[in-house]
Image (cartoon, rainbow, N blue to C red):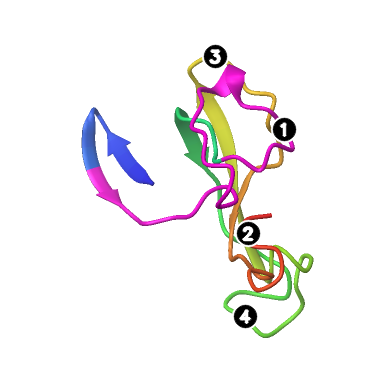
């Protein structure tokens, strides 16, 4: 994931998106909800970290078995639109049994 400001890269982090067997990269309007594919390519907004049981409480309550204790909402901005919704950055809390879900 790359952060771009005024057309220049400001930094990046390594991320995993989608399940291993579904690595088809699409633009927003071609990306289908429930496909388990990576996020559509495009411009996104990044929300604040939301903690289930208080800031930095990794061993506290979790949102659910797949998300874990923290999540960051993402908003698709362009190009066009996407049918995908409720997109989050989160720890892959159940990666041992259901990676990428």
Q: Disc 2 designates what residue?
A: 71
Mark in front: 2 vs 3: 3
Q: Which percent across, then down, holds residue 20?
A: 55, 52
3 or 1: tag closer to the N-terminus: 1
Q: Disc 3 designates what residue?
A: 80
Residue 11 belongs to the span the image colors magenta: yes
| SS majority, magenta | loop
Do the residues bearing badges 3 and 1 touch, measured as CB atoms within 8 Å? no
4 or 3: tag closer to the N-terminus: 4
Q: Which residues are magenta?
A: 10-37
Quarter location, residue 62: bottom right
Residue 22 belongs to the span the image colors magenta: yes
Q: Please tell me whether mark 4 sits on a helix, a strand or a loop.
A: loop
Q: CA distance from mark 4 to mark 3?
A: 36 Å
Residue at image position (50%, 22%) is 27
Q: Disc 1 designates what residue?
A: 33
Total labels: the figure holds 4
């Amino acid at each position: 994931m790359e952060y771009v400001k005024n057309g220049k890269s400001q930094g990046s982090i390594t991320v995993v998106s989608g399940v291993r067997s579904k690595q088809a990269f699409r633009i927003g309007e071609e990306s289908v909800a429930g496909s388990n594919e990576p996020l559509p390519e495009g411009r996104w907004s990044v929300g604040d970290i939301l903690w289930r049981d208080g800031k930095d409480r990794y061993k506290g309550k979790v949102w659910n078995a797949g998300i874990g204790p923290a999540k960051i909402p993402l908003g698709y901005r362009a190009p066009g639109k996407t049918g995908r919704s409720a997109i989050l950055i989160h720890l892959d809390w159940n990666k041992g049994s259901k990676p990428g879900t």
